[in-house]
Image (cartoon, rainbow, N blue to C red):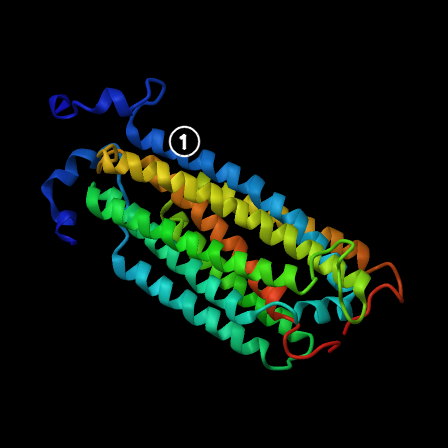
Amino acid sequence: MLNNVTDPAVEDGATEREPHLVPLRVYFSVFAALMVLTALTVFAATKDLGAFNTVVALAIACMKAVLVVLYFMHVRYSTKLTWAVVAGGFFWLLLLLLMTLSDYITRGPGWLHFG
Amino acid sequence: MSGTHSDEPSVLQHHFDNLGQQFEASSLGMWLFLVTEILFFGGLFTAYMVYRLTYPEAFAEASHHLNIVLGGTNTAVLIGSSLTMVMAVYAAQQGARNRQVLFLVLTMVLGLVFLGVKSVEYSHKFAEGLVPGPNFRFEGDAIHAQLFFSLYFVMTGLHALHMIVGIGIMAVLTVFAWRGRYTRRYHTPVEVSGLYWHFVDIVWIFLFPLLYLIDRHGAGG
């Protein structure tokens, strides 16, 4: 299955387009990590952690998203320009969430009831 | 050397210097589209955040009506489909036609399994009267539970729509892959379609805990 990697014909494209053949074990490890994290987040949801239920669930979701972006979407092996676009996209999402949140949580007592 | 690249004129567009530059442009273009998608779904996540903080009890009660087993199964199915997608890209990078077709088909099958489970969940919601509207039935804070289910249907519905589009893209890719269009030197469509598929997976990675899990441990807690 893997013997094509060492095929000498690879060199003809190497000068203009390197296909970044990520080793298969990287993909399998990421897949295993994603499954373990999914099981972990379901397990954590059955425990009463107070306000930390949301924090734990979101932290695990962020870890999973980072794994997918870096390895499955190859951002780890991409150019700085791609990095900047991806980081910019998530930064703007963070602005959207945080600016909105900072508005609502400063509207005084009675609006926000934390559990 | 140029004699060996007989397929070059058909895959290299004239306004690019080489295939590497052409791939970079395609990949970046897809990422720019995905950034707009991040903010598109971001608006819905923002709405969910605000209403969940405003009506925590109603949202907790309402989320107890979602089925964690079905939601969790779908999460695993979708992660599996992301694995088959990278395997399809890996096969394309090696120009392995049969494996490419196999993994693209597997990706579509897993995508259809996801949609099948989702439709089972939707039909349960219809049967239980949990679809917002005149027939909404809910013991407790029904008005604000409707808000939860409105967001649930819009967010998962738009996610499912993205899945349907993704499966359509995979079907087209499968036909072209079958015809041997994607080689070791040129397989950009498979790679950028993979980016789209993984993005849809990421959206679900956030939808699952936010809708199904975070209030699971106890109502009103």
Callout 1: helix, strand or loop?
A: helix
Circle 1 chain: B
- The answer to whether A110 appears left or right of B21 in the picture is right
Residue B133 placed where, x, y %? 76, 53
Q: Could you say which is closer to the camera, residue B12 or residue B202?
A: B202
Question: Callout 1: 10 Å neighbours few (<14), some, many (20+)?
Answer: some
Q: Quadrant of the C terminus of chain B?
A: bottom right
* Relative to A59, residue B147 above or below: above
Q: Quadrant of the N terminus of chain B?
A: top left
The residue that disc 1 covers is: B25
Residue at horizontal 27 percent and vertical 48 percent from the top: B90
Q: Could you say which is closer to the camera, residue A79 or residue A86?
A: A86
* Relative to B170, residue B76 above or below: below
- The answer to whether B35 appears left or right of A28 in the picture is right
Residue at horizontal 29 percent and vertical 52 percent from the top: B87
Residue at horizontal 28 percent and vertical 52 percent from the top: A22
* View extreme (top): residue: B14
Residue B122 placed where, x, y %? 59, 58
Residue at horizontal 58 percent and vertical 71 percent from the top: A56
- Name the quadrant containing residue B177: top left
Residue B119 placed where, x, y %? 53, 56
Q: Amino acid at mark 1?
A: Ala
